[in-house]
Image: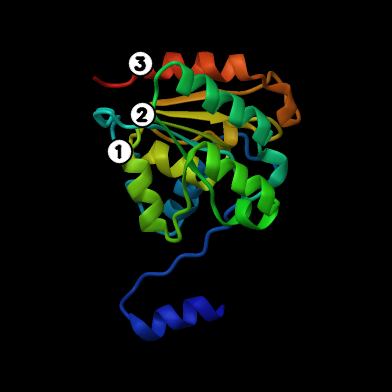
Amino acid sequence: DDPWSAHVAALAPQAVRAAVSPRPASDWTGHVVDWHRRELAAQGLALDLDPLPARRAADGGPVVLHPGSGAQVKCWPPARFAALADALLAEGHAVQVVLGEAERERWREGELRRWRAAYDVRQPLSLSALADVIEGAALFVGNDSGPTHLAAARGVPTVALFGPTSPARWRPQGAAVTVVAPPAPAAMAWLDVDAVLAAVRRARIAAPA
């Protein structure tokens, strides 16, 4: 009975519509994808929600870093992302930095200018443009955010950084995902650069050749 559903019904009367709460019930202990799968199955919609298999890393592709997230509390400090970028460049890796709408709104203009001057910054303005950047990556590093989930689902080797959110519920679904998370929920400042750099090295070794 919502406007979106009414528009769908008007445009495609034959469409099967199902309403699913995006967040699991408070007593749900599994992954959010399993919650969606169960809720859809209860309405007669058994969907293939499995991610793509791990793919071969793009030849000469960069390590793509995404320092943002829709919720600032889930963001690893930008200064540590910058230190990670510097360490990867020093090791001879190509690096690209993806800045999304949230970062463009949240960061000060001076900070944006410094990042653009120091790194190969990409600012995709559409989902398809973001997907193009991700598809060219040898490895993707990001917070618990939409782009990180997209990279994982596309089979790109992915390092996902967690702090206050639970990987048991929100871990990106993919065949080549490395999760870096504290033993218990914590602010993102818990995570140091050396730990992420070590995770990146492990993920690159494990990535399909």
Residue 143, by quadrant, is top right
Q: Quadrant of the C terminus?
A: top left
Reading the image, the residue beneath label 3 is 206
Q: Look at label 2 and name its amino acid.
A: Ala
Asked whether residue 189 is in view, the answer is yes
**Which residue is identified by label 1?**
52
The amino acid beneath tag 1 is Leu
Dot 3: what SS? helix
Q: Earlier in the sequence, mark 2 or mark 1?
A: 1
Task: Say if 101 sits above or below 168 in the image.
Answer: below
Marks 3 and 1: in contact by CB < 8 Å?
Answer: no
Q: Is residue 177 above or below residue 150?
A: above
Check whether the beta carbons of the residues at disc 2 and disc 1 lie within 8 A of each other.
yes
Q: Of the residues tagged 1 and 3, which is closer to the observer?
A: 3
Residue 175's disc is 2
Determine whether the residue tagged by mark 2 lies in a helix, strand or loop: loop
**Looking at this view, is 85 or 114 the one in front?**
114
Where residue 62 sits in the image (x, y, percent)? 37, 32
Q: Please state if 147 lies on the left or on the right of 187 as rendered.
A: left
* Residue 62 marker: none
Question: What amino acid is found at the position of numbered circle 3 in the picture?
Answer: Ala
Q: Tell me which residue sits at (33%, 49%) in the image.
A: 132
Q: Which of marks 2 and 3 is nearer the N terminus?
A: 2
Report, in whole angstroms, how far the alpha carbon at label 1 lies from the one at label 3.
17 Å
Q: Which corner quadrant of the image does residue 134 belong to?
A: top left
Q: How crowded is mark 2: few (under 14 residues within 10 Å), some or many (20 or more)?
A: many
